[in-house]
Image: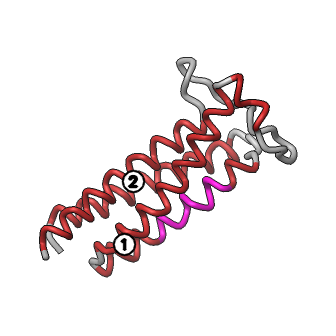
Amino acid sequence: MNKKLENGLLAIWVVSLVATLGSLYFSEIRQYTPCEMCWYQRILMYPIVIMTTVAYIQKNARIAVTTAVFACIGGSISLYHYSIQKLDFLQSTAPACGLVPCTGQYINWLGFITIPFLALTAFVMIAAISFHMLRVLKEEK
């Protein structure tokens, strides 16, 4: 595996680890109860840390296909979640979540940075790195 692919795996691992630790910080330290959509995003983010750890040890850059799929699905959920928080006309389409409404905003830094926005940023970064790795793999053939 060349250095570009190795660095890509490491970058995906770092982004997913920071996102995972950030979500755990908000729920376990700050005591913010995650809504249902937040759980779906976590379900797609947390395994990326484990997958890329194993892939890095095995020097398996082909995991980029899997991380791209997880990131695209997770990013789609994050984008919808962020949209129902910020766009009034979509708030009526919000799913009927359990204890915490999905339209709630625990944080609202600078007027636009919410928890789903942070997750979306991480998923976009992971997807971009994954697609770059796939292009590098294709060029190596």
Which numbered disc covers residue 63? Answer: 1
Specify which label sits upstream in the sequence, 2 or 1.
Answer: 1
- Where is the N terminus found, in terms of image quarters? bottom left
- Residue shown at the point (71%, 25%) measured from the top left: 89
Quarter of the rendering containing residue 65 = bottom left
Q: What residue occupies the far bottom of the structure in this picture?
A: 58
115, 91: nearer the viewer = 91
Q: Identify the main secondary structure in magenta.
A: helix
Which numbered disc covers residue 126? Answer: 2
- Residue shown at the point (62%, 45%) measured from the top left: 25
How many tags in the picture?
Answer: 2
49 up-or-down from 107: above or below: below
Q: Please state the horizontal and vertical placement of residue 108, each as a whole percent of the image.
A: 61, 24
52, 90: nearer the viewer = 90
Quarter of the rendering containing residue 59 = bottom left
Q: Please state the horizontal and vertical placement of residue 35, each as a whole percent of the image.
A: 75, 45
What's drawn in magenta, residue-wise?
40-50
* Amino acid type of the residue that numbered disc 1 sits on in the rendered structure: Ile
Residue neighbourhood size for the residue with mark 2, other residues' Cα within 10 Å, grouped as few (<14), some (14–19), many (≥20): many
Colour treatment of the image: secondary structure
Give left or right: position of 51 versus 28.
Answer: left
